[in-house]
């Protein structure tokens, strides 16, 4: 399978005779702690039959489950992948995927992100990208990882028509750090004309940090690396930087803003929410019902969380609202253990409350916005994970048949209907820019609940939403 355009010649593969697959196309080069340089011309035929290396990283839980921790890594990691119909009769909507992983781990080579099933189901073109992670991507105010994503969008704008995609109809979507990347990209002046629509799954919006947080994290990393400046970091080996990164994760309390995009840093405005609204890029924002159950179950101290400890967590997060909050959560999360009560509260603190805040900010500026709530609980571990963070990924990609999905989502036959409900909305959005449920408005807060059945809820669990007003 060969495609030639003004940039060069790309040698890919066919999947099932129906899908063209181009893997590991390098879209930019970048020296350590420098901005990416777009690749606009390829002097030799590009072998696009294997994934490119992932960014060096400290593997997390998902990398263990999905067996990506042993994939090749390199600081030269700016590669993208493309799936599309073999013989498209017209230019097709483009879905541009940004993987998650707390801005510190992950790869587009994850099997759950394979685009074959989504392309066959929806007649679209799917692009996925790697970008720099950890200190390589986000050191101080330098948002190199964000600039990488923008460089990949420029590559798509220049080249995707040759692969059957419409450069004027590009929908970016991502989950977790990928979801907050989506929101950040809608706010950036550098993406004007590159993005048509956006979909943020469980966006980790609290990871969009301030300049003060960025500088604090940089100083702590320099200390961990035993360096006095970023220039001195350039002389370290890749492994020395990874070792210092691992040390940061042990010693730093505020893990979520260790290596993340800085508001007001490179490519991003100070007020991402307002700038996202002003861009007028239509945006869908969604969260999972039990996001933080994933980390609660993995927490080695989980067995020590009794009701007294749980109350302490509530006090720290909600201050003077904590006494009011406990009975509200007890009513809306019946039969939850103390640990699960903490996870429910932290789900709202880390995901739902920032999502409400973002959507409210956008609608104040008349920016088209929708909200959904994914609620299907996995039956594995006797239901301990609930509808946790990341559970929706294989459902969105219609990849329930991929390796190790059953370890996370079980084998219940109901899974396919949930996937169909979810994926159909994404594909409709990519094609025509609208979905089946009403837009999010402050007067109604319409929210689509996605499960085996779907239903539109209006201001769901308003008691919880009001608890978190002014808490962020």
Image (cartoon, rainbow, N blue to C red):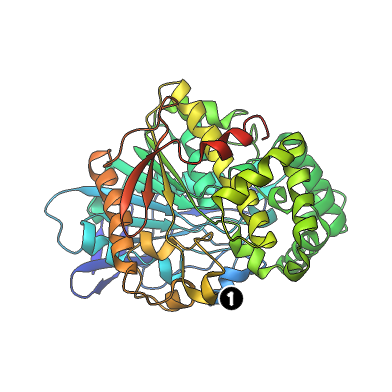
> Taking the image as drawn, is residue 75 in sight?
no
Q: Quadrant of residue 167?
A: top left
329 relative to 362 in the view: left or right:
right
144 relative to 192 in the view: left or right:
right
Give the x, y percent position of residue 21.
30, 67
Which residue matches tag 1?
Answer: 64
Q: Can you name the residue that lies furthest to the left here?
A: 89
Q: Quadrant of the N terminus?
A: bottom left
Give the x, y percent position of residue 117.
28, 66
> Taking the image as drawn, is residue 333 in sight?
yes
Q: Please give the name of the residue rendered at 60% of the width and 28% of the height, measured from the top-left corner.
A: 271
* 443 is higher (above) or lower (below) than 66: above
Q: Please give the name of the residue rendered at 21% of the width and 49% of the height, measured from the top-left corner.
A: 92
Circle 1 packing at 10 Å, graded few (<14), some (14-19), many (20+), is: few
Question: Foreground: 181 or 78?
Answer: 181
Q: Quadrant of residue 349?
A: top right
Q: Quadrant of the C terminus?
A: top right
């Amino acid at each position: 399978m060969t495609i030639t355009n003004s940039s060069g010649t790309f040698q890919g593969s066919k999947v099932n005779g129906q899908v063209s697959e181009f893997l590991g196309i390098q879209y930019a080069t970048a020296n350590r702690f420098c901005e990416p340089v777009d690749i606009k011309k390829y002097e030799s035929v590009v072998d696009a039959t294997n994934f490119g290396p992932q960014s060096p990283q400290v593997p997390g839980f998902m990398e263990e489950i999905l067996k990506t921790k042993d994939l090749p890594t390199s600081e030269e990691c700016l590669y993208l992948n493309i799936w599309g119909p073999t013989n498209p009769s017209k230019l097709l909507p483009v879905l541009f995927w940004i993987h998650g992983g707390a801005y510190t781990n992950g790869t587009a080579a994850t099997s759950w992100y394979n685009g074959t099933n989504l392309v066959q189901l929806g007649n679209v073109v799917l692009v996925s990208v790697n970008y720099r992670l950890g200190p390589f991507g986000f050191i101080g105010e330098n948002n190199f990882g964000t600039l990488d994503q923008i460089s990949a969008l420029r590559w798509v704008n220049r080249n995707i028509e040759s692969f059957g995609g419409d450069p004027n109809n590009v929908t970016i979507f991502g989950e977790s750090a990928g979801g907050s990347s989506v929101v950040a990209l809608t706010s950036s002046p550098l993406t004007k004309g590159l993005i048509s629509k956006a979909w943020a799954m469980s966006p980790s919006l609290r990871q969009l940090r301030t300049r003060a947080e960025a500088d604090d994290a940089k100083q702590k990393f320099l200390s961990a690396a035993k360096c006095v400046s970023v220039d001195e970091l350039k002389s370290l080996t890749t492994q020395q930087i990874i070792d210092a990164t691992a040390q940061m994760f042990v010693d730093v309390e505020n893990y979520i803003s260790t290596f993340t995009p800085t508001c007001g840093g490179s490519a991003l405005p100070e007020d991402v929410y307002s700038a996202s609204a002003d861009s007028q890029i239509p945006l869908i924002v969604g969260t999972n019902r039990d996001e933080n159950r994933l980390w609660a179950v993995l927490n080695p101290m989980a067995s020590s969380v009794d009701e007294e400890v749980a109350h302490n967590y509530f006090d720290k997060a909600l201050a003077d609202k904590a006494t009011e909050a406990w009975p509200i959560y007890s009513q809306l999360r019946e039969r939850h253990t103390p640990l699960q009560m903490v996870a429910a509260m932290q789900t709202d603190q880390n995901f739902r409350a920032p999502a409400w805040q973002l959507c409210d900010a956008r609608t104040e500026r008349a920016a088209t916005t929708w909200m959904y709530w994914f609620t299907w609980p996995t039956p594995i571990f006797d239901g301990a994970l609930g509808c946790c963070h990341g559970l929706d990924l294989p459902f969105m990609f219609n990849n329930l048949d991929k390796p190790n999905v059953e370890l996370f989502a079980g084998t219940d036959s109901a899974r396919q209907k949930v996937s169909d409900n979810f994926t159909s909305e994404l594909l409709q959005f990519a094609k025509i820019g609208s979905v089946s449920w009403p837009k999010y408005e402050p007067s109604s807060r319409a929210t689509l609940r996605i499960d085996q059945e779907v239903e539109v809820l209006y201001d769901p669990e308003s008691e919880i939403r009001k608890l978190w007003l002014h808490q962020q």
